[in-house]
Amino acid sequence: MKVVRVITLAVCLLAGAGAANAEIVQVSDTLNYTDNGPVHGFYFWEPTTVVDHTPFHRHAWEDWGWMHDVSALVPDGATGISSATLNVLAWGVNDSVGEVDIISANGTQLGTLTSISSEPVPPVPPEMYTVPGQPYGALTDWSITSFALPSNVLQALFLNGDLNVFMNIDATLNGDRVTIRSSTLKVNYLTGTPVPEPATLGLLGLGALALLKRRHA
């Protein structure tokens, strides 16, 4: 019994030491109309423009994409990425009546935009809606869709430091349009000493047992 208690204590101490040294550092990158240009596209909605007009309110034949670059934000000592989310703030998503706007990242489909916001929508200053012709209800028709990035996308993001996002607007050709206000990438980097895996802890426990047996011999 004494041997088992000693081994258990040793394994717990090692696991605790690893957990104490491992940290998660979150970085965030947001793109909006101030980033419009050749790299990110020209179609993030600009304030004081009519939200349901071209060039921002786009049709099925006007698909476009943008790129998040977090290479300069990677924390020192990063050993990997534990998780990351992409939040797309859009206007006029009518998924309840069949609109399908597909979001992909680095060639992997993440899902579709929804009209029910998964996160609190940032307020829009009233002066942004003083433009003649602004549609009724524009203040309330924004929604955020949050996508958790899968492991293969996380690996590419860690290696390259960028995320190429593409939107297939109205994929079912239902006659729908959508306006994008912003895109936010949040990345949780792992730094410090990684927590030992269970298999590693098992080996450490066997080593402790061998040492105890030698000591008793």
Image (cartoon, grey):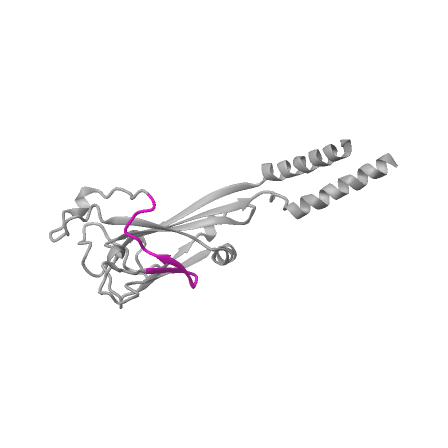
Magenta region: 102-119
Who is closer to the viewer here, 70 or 5? 5
Q: In this image, 202 relative to 150: left or right?
A: right
> Is residue 5 depicted above or below 44 in this figure?
above
Could you tell me residue 58's position as x and y percent?
Answer: 24, 62
Quarter of the figure with the C terminus: top right
Write the residue at 22% across / 61% down.
55
Residue 76: horizontal and vertical position, in percent? Answer: 54, 45
Q: Position of residue 92 (x, y in %)?
A: 23, 54
Number of labels in the image equals: 0
- Residue 1 in which image quadrant: top right
Q: What residue do we see at 50% from left, 47% from top?
A: 189
The magenta stretch spans residue 193? no
- Residue 108 image-quadrant placement: bottom left
Q: Nearer the viewer, residue 133 or 95?
A: 95
Report whether 204 appears left or right of 32: right
Q: Residue furthest front?
A: 1
The furthest residue to the left: 132
| Residue 32 at least partly seen | no
Residue 77 seen from this side: yes
Residue occupying image coordinates x 26% and y 60%: 98
Q: Position of residue 15 (x, y in %)?
A: 64, 39
Give left or right: position of 21 versus 42: right
Above or below — where is 109 with respect to 136? below
